[in-house]
Image (cartoon, rainbow, N blue to C red):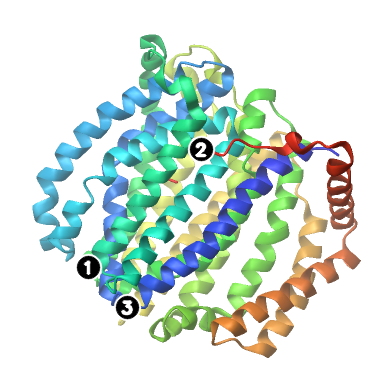
Amino acid sequence: MRGVGLKLTGALFYAAKLYGLVVGAAFILLITRNLAPEEYGAWSVISSLLAYATAGTVVNYWVTRFRAYGDASATSTGLALAAGFSLAALAAFAALAGSLPRLFGIPLAAAWLALPYIPVLYANSALYAAVYAVKPRAAALSEFAFETAKLAAALVFALGGRVTLWEAMLSVLAGYAAQLTSLALAAGGEALRRPSAGTAGRMLSYSWLSAMSLLASLIGTADALLISHFSSNEAVAYYTVVLVYSNAIAYSYLLARGLYQRLLSAGNRPELVEESLRAVLLLAIPSTVGAVALAPNLLYLLNPLYARGADVLRAAALTAMLGTVNGVLLDAVQGAERVDAAAVSHRELVKSKLFKVVALSYAKDAVALPGIALSIALARDPVSVAAGARLSWLAAELLATAALAGWAKSLGVRAPAREALEFAIAALAASLPALLINPLRIREALLTLLAAALTYFATLYLLSRWFRLQVSQALKLLAKAPEKGETGRFCISPFSFR
């Protein structure tokens, strides 16, 4: 029963994202059916701008690590730092808001509506970092609160007969506010403790490293802004609309969401990393195969205009699958590194794997962004620009996979090659009924999903000894819980931004 607790935590995170996927699909349908591609692209640009405005959340990387090491003051200290950074970010964004319509073609009203996002996102990020360190399941449940509130607000607007970019942004803001409330309840009294000047000092002194990581992320986030400014918001729409499906693949990583916290507490555990890789690939591989095979159909469901962006989705799907593997390997490398458990010098941080992970982020940007620039320069239509940009990120993710696999191997982690092959064979078998149905309506898509899932898991049960063992363990847990009245064993208190 190795890693059962880890799997339960991962399963809850994945269930939260599956719920979010269903809710998000309904939300996106409301949006894409009511917004023109240019408006949808403008929304993506605003999201990118907010990523820059929330750069101060870099300290929350250390909130998670310090809280996992046992420092209870990390929660309130992280919140105090978030408050300070959010005030500075609000002032800077307000000063620039008037120029955003001219630079990126977004409505002025939408630029001003982005302002209340900033304090909510700062507080949300700080609390999430702390709660995840000690109550990862409560962090997962906060995602349910976000998705529910977001869709509820969107439905209210839809019933009122008005869904514009303004209403879409208000709906998402309502979701973040609900998540913040959920996280505050989960944190309880820790959020109200007196912040620690010593803990704040350590967080800030180490944050040059996480700031470097964030800078790499922000450089990468410039992709949508570059496409918007030098090509068009229509190209941004084709570039970003595929995230509806590629994110569904990326969510497979959440099956390993409890790994990082476990490694911070217990140290290097190669067997847990290997088991997490199997769990992630179990769903990432068939999801990717399905997205590649049915790319035109999936985009047609959102809006027939997007169906010609099938190659954009295929590239994004392959990138997302590699990203799920890389996410597990990143957790393995960073979770096993404990150099910051005690006060250390900058030189010691530079020698650690934490710094190597940051350097890898810059290497990815160095591969992807020139490729995106080349796509903008050479492509003759918005779809080609978007496809070239997604292929550039695929090349960057391949680079990351090669580097992380080497580091993980040095920790004793072995690749689950046999299980990955079994998952791929079962996924190819499952794609056959999907291709035969050829869905173009939502009802047909649901039927396709059911037929493909049944085929995949039935085939896998015959092929994979590992999968049969997981089914057996799950059935034992289901049978054991009611027998002993252990309802409290899996009870979680009822209470993302990256």
Please state if 487 lies on the left or on the right of 22 as rendered: right
Tell me whether circle 1 and circle 2 mark residues in contact (CB < 8 Å). Answer: no
First along the sequence among labels 1 and 2: 1
Residue 19 at x, y percent in the picture: 57, 58
Which secondary structure, mark 2?
helix
> Which residue is more in the foreground, 119 or 292?
119
- The numbered disc on residue 45 is none
Q: Label 1 sits on what residue type?
A: Phe
First along the sequence among labels 1 and 3: 1
Examine the rendering and report whether any part of residue 319 can be seen: no
Residue bearing mark 2 = 357
- The numbered disc on residue 230 is 1
Q: Distance between the residues labelled 1 and 3?
A: 11 Å
Q: How far apart are marks 2 and 3 (CA)?
A: 33 Å
Categorize mark 2 by other alpha carbons within 10 Å: few (<14), some (14-19), many (20+).
Answer: some
Placement of 271 over or under 107, stated as above or below: above
Which secondary structure, mark 3?
helix
Q: How far apart are marks 1 and 2 (CA)?
A: 31 Å
Residue drawn at x 56%, y 62% as measured from the top left: 248
Q: Label 2 sits on what residue type?
A: Val
Residue 377 at x, y percent in the picture: 28, 72
Residue drawn at x 26%, y 30% as measured from the top left: 85
Which secondary structure, mark 1?
helix
> Which residue is more in the foreground, 147 or 62?
147
Residue 64 at x, y percent in the picture: 51, 28
- The numbered disc on residue 382 is 3
> Which residue is more in the foreground, 126 or 190?
190
Front of the two marks 2 and 3: 3
